[in-house]
Amino acid sequence: MIMPAAPLPLPQLSLGQSGIVDSVRVPPEHRGRLLELGLLVGTRVELVRFAPLGDPVEVKVRGYHLTLPRQEAEQIWVTPV
């Protein structure tokens, strides 16, 4: 029996790896913007790359590329697929 992977912060995915958004743990005043950008629970995201110094983080979500500050990306928990 294969156990499903445990959720982890988005930047902990390997480059090119995908995950399904499990939860968005940002403060309510910032959550609306992320939801409008398509980062809803159940959405598939792919970690594309990190900037040279590790911040920001680029992800692919719903067919487009989105760049997020690393601190914000760490508050998006995903289940690896």
Image: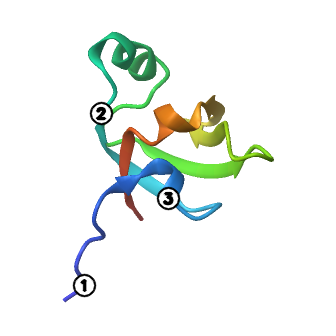
Secondary structure, mark 1, is loop
Instruction: Give the Cα distance between marks 2 and 3.
Output: 15 Å
For mark 2, does the 10 Å Cα neighbourhood hold few (<14), some (14 to 19), or many (20 or more) residues? some
At horizontal 64% and vertical 41% (from top left) the residue drawn is 57
User: Which mark is nearer the camera, 1 or 2?
Assistant: 2
Decide which of tag 1 and tag 3 comes sooner along the chain. 1
Quadrant in the picture for the C terminus: bottom left
At horizontal 50% and vertical 58% (from top left) the residue drawn is 12
Q: In the image shown, does 13 or 17 lie closer to the viewer?
A: 13
Residue 45 position (above or below residue 31): below
Residue 16 position (above or below residue 24): below
What kind of residue is marked 1? Ile
Decide which of tag 2 and tag 3 comes sooner along the chain. 3
> In the rendering, at what x and y percent does residue 55 appear?
67, 39
Residue 7 position (above or below residue 24): below
Q: Which residue is mark 2?
A: 25
Instruction: Give the Cα distance between marks 1 and 3.
Output: 21 Å
> In the rendering, at what x and y percent does residue 3 appear?
22, 79
Marks 2 and 3 close (CB-CB < 8 Å): no
| Mark sitting on residue 12 | 3
What kind of residue is marked 3? Gln
Decide which of tag 1 and tag 2 comes sooner along the chain. 1
